[in-house]
Image (tube, rainbow, N blue to C red):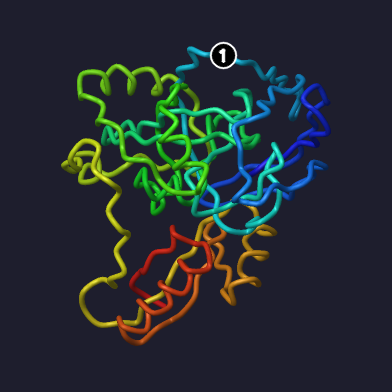
């Protein structure tokens, strides 16, 4: 779940509150900074912030130029669209952005998916995640570009970089920069060994062999558009918007989008439907993505 601090100035104390998230779970914002509209987003001033604690765990934000870590990435959707991030920007679910516990706001990182090698450029503009076993919370747009919107969580490498101004401007506009060169398998094997020694966050499911062995797209190719096609065959179909570890967050999103919440163990799935035909399901998918839910997917069944 998302976790968002009170920021009055660069030296102000960050106070964070929240709980665990999977596939879109986010916490209410408690930021006092005024929200900057999308057309006024800037890379200055850069905010580092004061040390803070969550559930007894102390975090110390720092301007670490050589930051390079492995861990688990989750993502969040459109529940907080338009509300302020930790540095006062308006949250845009479709933008390629993320939350990190210690890196400056804003800063830029390359996020690599360790099962496929796909690497994207992401702009950090928020604080989180609350779960100490997760490294980064991606926006829905970043999750889609990285290819983890359907899975909800993935093993990743997060490396701070200093991209050219053209890429920075693209991300500030809320658009996706061109993908980076895919990470070679030899390096991925080393990174996988590192992350295998870390505790797994709740809700993480290892990728299937089919997903891991998938042929990556050409280096630096723009992200392909998300499919709008229902599975082949007869209905009924449903559209899943997200999967949450918090019933409250799931219900907030469901009410906003006219969806329902289905519980499966400790996970709360937000869905719409059933739809008798593929055409009806695809129309609903387009509606949800237009409403700021690029991670929505069509599934077979009611």
**Relative to 193, 302 lies left or right:** right
The answer to whether any part of residue 71 appears in the image is yes
Tell which residue pokes out farthest to the bottom in this image.
276
Q: Which residue is mark 1?
A: 64
Q: Residue at x 50, y 49 (%)?
A: 174
The answer to whether any part of residue 266 appears in the image is no
Residue 237 drawn at (x, y percent): 36, 77
User: Is the residue 273 above or below the residue 213 in the image?
Assistant: below
User: Is the residue 185 above or below the residue 283 in the image?
Assistant: above
Quadrant where the N terminus is found in the figure:
top right
SS type, badge 1: loop
Q: Residue at x 36, y 43 (%)?
A: 146
Query: Front-most of 290 and 4?
Result: 290
Residue 147 drawn at (x, y percent): 34, 47
Q: Residue at x 80, y 36 (%)?
A: 6
Q: Residue at x 43, y 77 (%)?
A: 284
Residue 258 drawn at (x, y percent): 59, 77
Q: Quadrant of residue 3?
A: top right
**Relative to 49, 106 lies left or right:** left
Q: Quadrant of residue 235?
A: bottom left
**Relative to 170, 265 lies left or right:** right
Query: Front-most of 211 and 267?
Result: 211
- All told, the count of numbered labels is 1
Query: Front-most of 66 and 184?
Result: 66
10 Å neighbourhood of mark 1: few (<14), some, or many (≥20)?
A: few
Quadrant where the C terminus is found in the figure:
bottom left
Residue 298 drawn at (x, y percent): 36, 69
């Amino acid at each position: 779940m998302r976790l968002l601090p009170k920021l009055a100035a660069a030296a102000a104390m960050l106070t964070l509150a929240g709980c665990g998230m999977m596939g879109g779970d986010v916490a209410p914002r408690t930021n006092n900074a005024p929200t900057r509209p999308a057309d006024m987003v800037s890379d200055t001033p850069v905010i580092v912030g004061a040390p803070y604690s969550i559930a007894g765990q102390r975090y110390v934000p720092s301007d670490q130029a050589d930051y390079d870590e492995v861990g688990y990435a989750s993502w969040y959707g459109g529940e907080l669209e338009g509300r302020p991030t930790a540095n006062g920007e308006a949250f845009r679910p479709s933008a390629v952005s993320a939350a990190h516990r210690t890196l400056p706001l804003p800063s830029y990182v390359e996020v690599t998916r360790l099962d496929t090698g796909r690497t994207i450029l992401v702009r950090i503009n928020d604080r989180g995640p609350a779960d100490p076993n997760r490294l980064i919370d991606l926006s829905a747009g970043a999750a889609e570009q990285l290819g983890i919107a359907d899975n909800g969580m993935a093993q990743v490498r997060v490396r701070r970089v200093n991209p050219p101004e053209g890429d920075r401007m693209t991300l500030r506009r809320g658009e996706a920069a061109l993908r980076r060169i895919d990470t070679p398998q030899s390096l991925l094997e080393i990174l996988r060994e590192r992350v295998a020694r870390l505790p797994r966050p709740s809700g993480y499911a290892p990728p299937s062999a089919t997903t891991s062995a998938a042929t990556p797209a050409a280096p630096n190719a723009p992200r392909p558009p998300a499919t709008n096609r229902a599975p082949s065959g007869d209905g009924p179909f449903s559209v899943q918007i997200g999967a949450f570890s918090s019933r409250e967050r799931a219900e907030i999103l469901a009410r906003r989008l006219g969806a329902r919440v289905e519980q499966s163990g400790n996970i709360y799935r937000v869905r719409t439907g059933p739809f008798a035909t593929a055409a009806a399901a695809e129309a609903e998918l387009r509606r949800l993505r237009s409403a700021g839910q690029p991670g929505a997917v069509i599934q077979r069944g009611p």
